[in-house]
Amino acid sequence: MYLKESPPPAGSLAAALLLALAEEGVDRQVSLPRLGKRLQQGVSVLLRELTLMGSARLGPRTGPGWVAVQQDGDRWLASLTPAGAAAAAAAATAAAAIETPDEDTVPPPLVRVPVLRESRIDAGDPTSVEDTDWIAAEVPVALVFNGISHAVMMATPQDLEDFALGFALSEGILDEAADCRGMELHTVSLPTAADDDPEAPAIELRLDISSRAFARLKDRRRSLAGRTGCGVCGIDSLSALDLLPASAGPRSMAGIDVRSVLAAFDALSRCQPLNAQAGSLHAAGWALPDGTLVEVLEDVGRHNALDKLLGRLVRLGLLDAPGFVVMSSRGSYELVRKCTRLGVTAMASISAPTALAVRIAREGRLALWGLARRDKAVRYA
């Protein structure tokens, strides 16, 4: 669900919808097939996205109210509200800033590239059509604490302040959000070997942390170079591998059962606008005990998506309320460990967990479901 005070990220489907509706005019109703043809998206994808952009209530929060959607017979119609007009203006400004970037403009989360769509026809030659398509951006993000670079992660450039806070908390660098005294985001350009694009974007997140947290970080500092598919790349020895669950003590499990888990997964795909366009991003969601999703964050890396979610929950004060985490990935050990560190009650993943993840979940008293698909899920811990 989007925040009223923040326009959708440039390059996202929500931003494209706002701009398309703005060109049609405020209050003018536009059919979803027409929007779909213009944006090269299916009606079902647009309907899911417009639902998140409307004023529907999900748990304790309501949507931003940017659009109004109604059904007229067999047709679905969408129109822009005055609040949506303001968000569209902000989205247009953000898009213009990307076209003429300054030194601290964050690159968009999705990039449009030329592709060749190929298909096989029975008893005939293959066909190919030139087209363009959206793909996910993946940029180096350096996390710098009091001037010292601690980690470089390959991540989707969106919700980066949430990511930095969530990483610092889930990795035990900070004990609480108040240990972060300030944060600055800076973009830098890295040289490449490509003649047509000699520079690649990168981002530095510079955190000013308390002296107590910084002293502890220096005592156990390790060099870590993260990849999208690995949680321990770059540690310099086996002794640096921390497998303890570091539990903060789970909260109440009241009302959370397999029905809640499956209800959350039923709604998860509708809350992944970037993945709906690019098809290569993971999602981490926070669900209420009845399975209602109230926050979903996306990233090319599953652990990055979880850090973004945890940072968002801490920032909004939602982590103290009952709920559980859902992941569009396997239940790997680092995801379980991050959840136990912040006292999360339960976690569910769409694929199976690893043996180490199950062990850590049991030691950290985290309820763990896996293979949560359709009408079944397996509880491992």
Image (cartoon, rainbow, N blue to C red):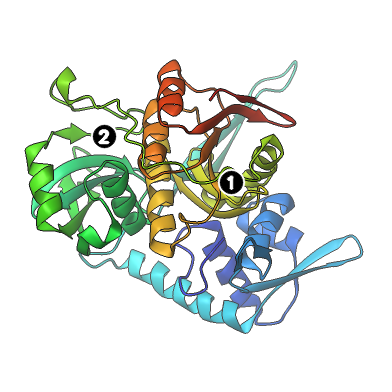
266, above or below 96, in the image: above
Q: Amino acid at mark 2?
A: Gly
Q: Quadrant of residue 264?
A: top right
The local crowd at label 1, few if under 14, some if 14 to 19, many if 20 or more residues have their Cα within 10 Å, is many
Name the residue carrying label 2: 226
Q: Please state the horizontal and vertical placement of residue 70, each as a whole percent of the image.
A: 80, 69
Answer with the quarter of the image where residue 232 lies.
top left
Give left or right: position of 366 versus 271.
left
Describe residue 279's horizontal placement relative to residue 334 as left or right.
Answer: right
Q: What residue lies at 41% left-to-right and 41% top-to-bottom?
A: 249
Q: Looking at the image, which residue is at 46% across and 43% down?
A: 344
The x and y percentages for residue 212 are 12, 53
Return the residue at label 1: 276
- Residue at 44%, 56% (x, y): give it: 313
Asked if residue 86 is positioned above or below residue 167 in the image, the reply reads below
Number of the front mark, 1 or 2: 2
Q: Position of residue 2 (x, y in %)?
A: 54, 64
Residues marked 1 and 2 touching at CB (< 8 Å): no
- Tag count in the figure? 2
10 Å crowding of disc 2: few (<14), some (14-19), many (20+): many
Q: Secondary structure at mark 1?
A: helix
